[in-house]
Image: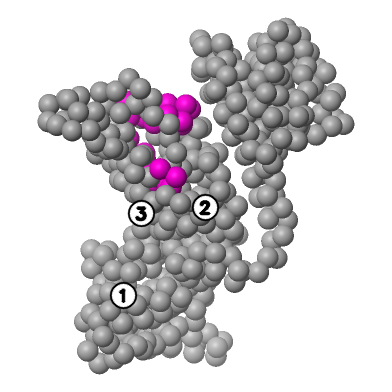
Amino acid sequence: MIPENFHNLPVLLVDDDPQALELLESFLRSSGMKYVVTFEDGRDLTRYLASFPAAVIVLDLMMPKISGITLLEEITNKNPGISVIVVTAEQQIDTAIECMKLGAVDYLTKPVVIKRFISSVNRALELYSLNEEIVASQNNATADEQHAASIAPYIITQNKEMLSLIRYVKIIADSFQPILISGETGVGKELFAQAIHTLSKREGMFVSVNVAGLDDTLFSDTLFGHKKGSYTGAISDRDGLIKKAANGTLFLDEIGDLNELSQIKLLRLLQENEYYPIGSDIPVQNNARLLVATNQHLKLRMIEGKFRKDLYYRLCSHQVNIPPLRSRLDDIPLLLNHYMTEYSNMQGKNKLTYRKELVNLLSTYDFPGNVRELQAMILDVVTRSSDGKIHVSSFKDLIAREKGSHFFDTELSEEIDFNPITFTRFPTIKEAETELIKRALELSNNNQGIAAQMLGITRQALNNRLRRKKAN
């Protein structure tokens, strides 16, 4: 059944077959929908939208006077907030997927199955409502940032982009739609998944599984479970993780590595919201919220033919793209203090002290392992500290080890986000030197020691150059 708060949202049905329209309308009204409008001519829909609202449009692709694809493009251009479901023949699946690229939120194949139709409209209404909340949140960009941070207190951040993400996940946390969490290794994808689960206030468990390297049989057994005797060694029934996560959240990490057969099964789970345990022909209803994560570029995987397009467009209704640590350098002092305190307490040490120069040093490193790498560095340094201090040299050594060569080689400029200096003409050596010194001081927050090391010269040499420039 459609949730009570969706009953009055307008749903429009567009099909040149009056019998199909009558049937679909009856399905919706029997499910509690009160605001259903039907159109046999797509051109009437265009005129209607110029004056009246719509939350969801169910659109047949094959119509004589104006094609469904033409209508879809017009709707998504002029009314991007409306959720559009396209209806197509079985042999036109590729066309339906192209429609999802254009902005459709789902597709149905003829003959339309009642349960699938109601479920699709339900999800589309939910997506419309969530988009309305997201727009309202964006319009209130002045919202208290401290409040945003308190929503997920174990995500340590003061960065505006991260705080905006936290506000976004609060809005989508109650949705039953899947959520795609992306970002580099070590940025905290599972932390965000746990935050979404906590904010959703679901009664069930948070269950996490890394699907990388699982073959199809192991994937199916892990998620769906099996029946006794379904294969050699299956001596009793076994529930899968989906059942374990009932009324809770199932988090699938490294979804980009999933093999093709498993992708098909995951797609069916998303479409039908049910699954079959191995050895059973009786479907089981899914009651778990699905979150997935990847550190890969799924669109590139699609181009390579390694990730199904239809699965991608099922997963990407809600996307959380977590920025790397090098893009949120303002979080480094916060993270440094947090993990230093945590690891000091774990080891029974008093709070350690450090010089401001340490933050400047860390801000010049690109952290390919992101927050996880910073955590490991801090744990190592705290463990080795015996005098109540954190020495900058300890981090220099760790960074040099990670790079495989000395961190302060002259090649450093190729590693950092340098924003290359441009000149209107070929510069002299003196002009180039001036700009390099200026850029190094900017990157090091005017710390001459670190700037000198970045430039590959001694601090005294840098001081001499700066004095000469002042004198000139």
Residue 318, position as x, y percentages in the image: 54, 43
Q: Mark 3: few, some, or many residues within 10 Å (few <14, many ≥20)?
A: some
* Spatial CA span between label 1 and label 3: 18 Å
Image side of residue 460 versus residue 114, left or right: left
Residue 309 seen in the figure: no
Task: Please name the residue that numbered disc 1 is placed on.
Answer: 378
Marks 1 and 3 in Cβ contact (< 8 Å): no
- Give left or right: position of 311 versus 18: left
Residue hosting label 3: 185
Q: Earlier in the sequence, mark 1 or mark 3?
A: 3
**How far from the left and from the top, in percent, is residue 288?**
43, 41
Q: Which of the 4 quarters of the picture holds residue 126?
A: top right
How crowded pointer 2 is (Cα within 10 Å; few <14, some 14-19, many 20+) is rated as many
Is residue 162 found inside the magenta-colored segment of the image? no
Amino acid type at circle 1 is Ile
Q: Position of residue 17 (x, y in %)?
A: 71, 8
Q: Quadrant of residue 233?
A: top left
- The amino acid beneath tag 2 is Ser
| Amino acid on which the number 3 mark rests in the picture | Thr
Q: Rounded to the nearest whole Å, what is the CA distance between mark 2 and mark 3?
A: 25 Å
For residue 43, above or below residue 434: above
Which quadrant does the N terminus fall into? Answer: top right
Please provide the residue range marked out in magenta.
246-274
Given residues 290 and 337, the one toward you in this image is 290
Residue at (55, 90) in percent of width and height: 471
Give the labeled residue for mark 2. Answer: 200
